[in-house]
Image (spheres, rainbow, N blue to C red):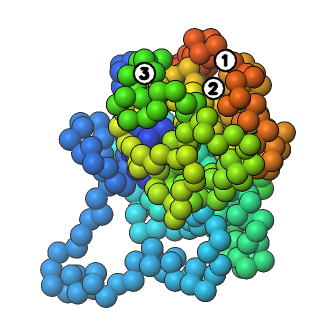
Amino acid sequence: MKIVHVSTSATGGAGGAAYRLYKGMLSQGMDVSFFTLKSKREDEPHLHVFKKKQSKGILSKIKNRIHTSQKQKNELRLVGKPKNYEMYSFPTTDSLVYNEKVLQEADVIHLHWISGFINYPSFFKNINTPIVWTLHDMNPFQNGFHYLNDHNNNANDFLALENEIQEIKTKSYHEANINVVAPSNWLKEASETSRLFKKFKHHTIANGIDTTVFKIQNKSFARTVFNLPQNKKIILFISEDISNKRKGFDILEEALSNLTINEDYTLVAIGKRPKRMLKNTVFLGSINDERLMALVYAASDAFILPSREDNLPNVMLESFLCGVPVIATPVGGMKEHIEHGINGLLANDMSGIALSKILGDYINGSIEFDNKKIREVAVEKFSLTGQVKKYNQLYRQILK
């Protein structure tokens, strides 16, 4: 049984999750490959980076220079549109990958986050192999936007473009043999009631994390490594781009401003630096090394997720495995896996006031957690080994 994972990238949130699953399958002896548009890991024998075939000759070179790429054409379609959204993706690219040997030899093609990589019309028309598609956001079953709030906030300005993309995707999916996997029930329910994906079979399989990397470690040592105070409660916030509105840093900002205590905590922020930082905040920049990230969790007392929309954030699972409770807004996968007072705290709503109340209770010491118990439950639910086993069962079920 040959499996090929397809992802625009092998890094980042979605790309990293796809790559981790692929490596987990490799470690268990499965016949698996990884096909991507961009990667710094090109020395791996099972990793294939797509290289567009270049025509030779002077005339072909001239033609390539004056040719407007599909990416450029798509970008021109967004000129003059509002920019108050996280991302907008088109289902058309110049990457005609369906003839690639690694795909042609696969028994199951496993899609992940493929925006900017796969040309939908040609790919789904020419691929007859069964497809498993793991959702990392809503884009596959929406039109151009990746989350519902962005669509709702911009529906009128993008109406014609949204209708055009929906038509392209509807035609592309018409004969496709797709099994959809969502890491959270929230995303599964949104997908199976959508116009584009409601006809496909749906499954829920949570993301898996390497339990040997993300584990409980000595807190005092971890704080020394990052030069963090030993005598204060440390609250951790992580986002690739801290200014991303969906991740809710502004909600956290409001919550912290409403606290009556000022010196009993330190906020540690990781990600692309925002324009301004809050009081009592230490900014560590971007960290891409997993073992270093595990040490950051070890230094923390709690991890905070004030998101407006989120699937099943890897950072939440990593925090659980490190024995660190998660304080969050009641949305998406957080609402499904945070047991209030057991492995974290859920605010009553998405407001800064609601978040401030539970954050204040925690910082004041009125709530305590069993770190070992948090990890123990997380290992049962989110181990990479368990995730691989569930996908292997799904592949065999589909082929049977």
What is the quadrant of residue 200 in the picture?
A: top right
Q: Is residue 171 left or right of residue 98?
A: right
Residue lying farthest to the left in this orientation: 57
Is residue 393 visible to the viewer in this orientation of the structure?
A: no
Q: Quadrant of residue 43?
A: top left
248, 198: nearer the viewer? 248
Tell me the SS state at disc 2.
loop
Numbered disc 3: secondary structure: helix
Task: Tell me which residue sits at (46%, 68%) in the image.
Answer: 93
Q: CA distance from mark 2 to mark 1?
A: 7 Å
Relative image position of residue 63 (x, y in whole percent): 27, 85
* Residue 140 horizontal/vertical position (percent): 63, 54
Tell me what residue is drawn at x 71 percent, y 29 percent.
364
Q: Residues within 10 Å of mark 1 (few under 14, many from 20)?
A: some
Kind of residue at disc 1: Phe
**Which residue, given by chain and number where applicable, does mark 2 sit on?**
325
259 or 180: nearer the viewer: 259
When asked about the image quadrant of residue 121, the answer is bottom right
- Where residue 173 appears, x then y in whole percent? 64, 55
How many other residues sit within 10 Å of disc 2, few (<14), some (14-19) or many (≥20)? many
In the rendered image, the quadrant that contains the C terminus is top right
- Tags 2 and 1 touching, CB below 8 Å: yes
* Quadrant of image for the N terminus: top left
Say which element carries label 1: loop
Give the mark nearest the N terminus, 2 or 3: 3
Residue 362 point in image, percent of width and height: 71, 29
Please name the residue that numbered disc 3 is placed on.
220
